[in-house]
Image (tube, helix red, strand yellow):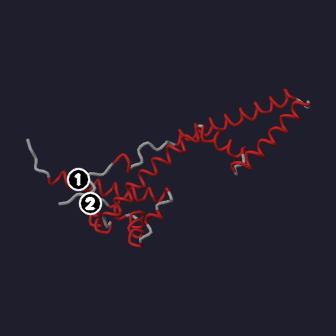
Amino acid sequence: MDYRFLNLDLPVTTFEGLSLPYQRKVALVATFLIWVGLAFAGFIGAQRIGPSAVADDIAAIFVLGTVLYYIVSGDFIVLSGAKALLNATPMGVLYRQDRSVLDKAKAELLLIASQVNFRDYLGYGKVNPEIRARGSLLVIAHQEKGDLSQWVNNPHNLKLLANLVYQIHLVEKLLAGDSMPQTD
């Protein structure tokens, strides 16, 4: 029997490396504290300069630099700086890491889905009822409809596809274990 799902890259298809909820909360709090700290530092800096001729010169140079930067690059420097800062914060780092894990999993799962017809595996539902669950049937319906790759752009739907693939893997692992000759 051809067990296609036994050679599955399990860590990739089960989203190994995805951040945990508590890690996201810690990153969010740390990012918030960074923003508050920078705002406070800016406020203190503005208070130190005070209403002086130097402050006016600094503001004029900043506005002129912003306009020149926009003319040359087409980007608004304040927005570019905010994006760069956001990418450097713990939340930005965690987001990029999670996006990488999800993109790898999506590519692997869509490759698997392109090689098999999930409807052929509904018989495995006798062994594992999860294969005939509503989420799995949704995946099968979208595969037959031909819009699976667009449908899994939603992370919840990607999770449904990953669950179906994993459940089929579990059944094949069980069946392969039963068909292996026992050695003592």
Query: Where is the N terminus found, in terms of image quarters?
Result: bottom left
Q: From the viewer's perspective, is residue 30 above or below residue 13? A: above
Image position of 78 (left or right of 182): right
Disc 1 or 2, which lies upstream in sequence? 2
- Tell me whether circle 1 and circle 2 mark residues in contact (CB < 8 Å): yes
Q: Name the front one of labels 1 and 2.
A: 1
Point 35% across, 64% down: residue? 114
Identity of the amino acid at label 1? Leu
Point 33% across, 48% down: residue? 10
Count of numbered tags: 2
- Residue 81 percent across, percent down from the top left: 68, 41
Q: Which mark is residue 120?
A: none
Mark 2: give few (<14), some (14-19) or many (20+) Cα within 10 Å: some
Point 26% across, 53% down: residue? 6
Identity of the residue furthest to the top in this view = 48
Find numbered disc 2 in the image and state the secondary structure of the residue it sits on: loop
- Residue 62 percent across, percent down from the top left: 80, 39
- Depth check: 57 or 155 in front? 57
- Depth check: 29 or 147 in front? 147
Identity of the amino acid at label 2? Val
- Depth check: 47 or 177 in front? 47
Point 55% across, 40% down: residue? 93
- Residue 58 percent across, percent down from the top left: 83, 34
Q: Which residue is mark 2?
A: 127
Query: Where is the C terminus found, in terms of image quarters?
Result: top left
Q: From the viewer's perspective, is residue 22 above or below residue 181? A: above
Identity of the residue furthest to the bottom in this view = 145
- Residue 63 percent across, percent down from the top left: 81, 42
Find numbered disc 1 in the image and state the secondary structure of the residue it sits on: helix
Q: Which residue is mark 1?
A: 174
Which image quadrant is residue 38 in? Answer: top right
Mark 1: give few (<14), some (14-19) or many (20+) Cα within 10 Å: few
